[in-house]
Image: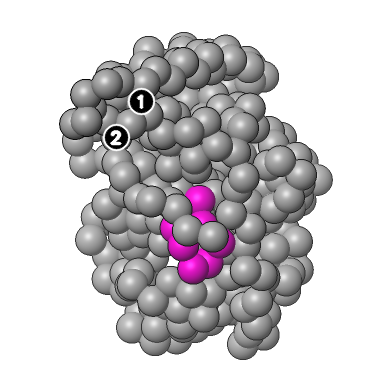
Amino acid sequence: MSFPIRWAWGPAAALSACALLLSACGDEDAADNSPTFVNTEARGTADPLYGETTAASAPVSSTAPAPESDSSSSTEPSAPVPAPAGDVQAVLDRIVAEHGNVGIAVSDGTTTVEAGRTAPEAAWSTSKVPVLIAANRTGGADNQLVSSAITYSDNEAARTAWATLGEAAAAAQAAQSVIAEAGDTATQVQSQVTRPEFTAFGQTMWSVGNQAKFMAGLRCVEGAQPIIDAMGVADPAQSYGLRTLPGAFMKGGWGPSPAGAYDVRQMGIVQLGGHDVAVAMIASAPDGQYASAQSVLTSMAEDLAQADTQWPTPAC
């Protein structure tokens, strides 16, 4: 099954100012407005992401997406032909047009359909998935470490796993091998710290298209199953975006962009139209707030769930 690839940008949609329960240890170690998480089951103590403890209320559902416009024919030979309602590319283009500064992609492992922000961007904590798989392969990640790093996105647990892979270059190569085995041979894991306050692997430049491709092949990767299992466990502090869809196993990442916005991204496998679909998406909050970008991802997920199309099925 093939899908034509096109990009479309629409006007930026207004970001809702909902207060969301914020997650701890999601990504890195320095930002004034960053989330915190109290994991009473796993650790029993507050574990702030950036050294401050904050509180927030439960997520607020975003509004339903606007209805699709009716297609119309034209007698002019040169007039553009509207994409059919079942066209995957058209669905992604509409999501981007509605939400503005976002990127989204789906993949079956061979064909990838993407729209919006498709250039590689900082992976943040989504990079913990290949790092923990690589550590699991060497015996350097037990179940508790995997749970902390993946389900609850604990930074120290991820750093511990990274350290078991050897020096920086060796660790990066081990994680990169995992990504390549899943089908993404373009992404290169960052081995050196590029922003002093953040980890090297967290600043790996990873596009939504390549993340969707990686997710499509993840279940075929050696040593991935414990990490996939942890991705399927819901952290109440991250109950937004792809996590709101049925059958989701996913990993999120978030952090401040150099331009001052706040980026939040997710990659995962969710059920759309009754079968599994590999999805990756990213959104920014111009106001610099984590919660604002969360609500955008939730609205994008709602749009995916309501779309009438035949989604590509992952290879694995």
Q: Relative to residue 288, is residue 249 depicted above or below?
A: below
Task: List the residue tagged with mark 2.
Answer: 8
Tell me residue 70's x, y (percent).
Answer: 46, 16
Could you tell me how far apart the alpha carbons at marks 1 and 2 are, in whole angstroms?
7 Å
Q: Residue at x 33, y 72 (%)?
A: 186
- Dividing the picture into quadrants, the one containing residue 147 is bottom right
55 or 68: which is nearer to us? Answer: 68
The residue indicated by pointer 1 is 97
Q: Secondary structure at mark 1?
A: helix
Front-most of 167 and 251? 251
Q: Residue 140 at what x, y percent from top left?
A: 63, 81
Please state, as top left, top right, bottom left or bottom right, where the C terminus lies in the image.
Answer: bottom right
Q: Which span of residues is magenta-colored? A: 106-112
Identify the element where label 2 is drawn: loop
Nearer the observer, 249 or 28: 249
The image shows residue 2 at horizontal and vertical percentages of 47, 58
Vertical comparison of 283 with 291: above or below? below
For the residue marked with disc 1, what is the amino acid?
Ala
Answer with the quarter of the image where residue 144 lies: bottom right
Q: Are marks 1 and 2 in contact (CB under 8 Å)?
A: yes
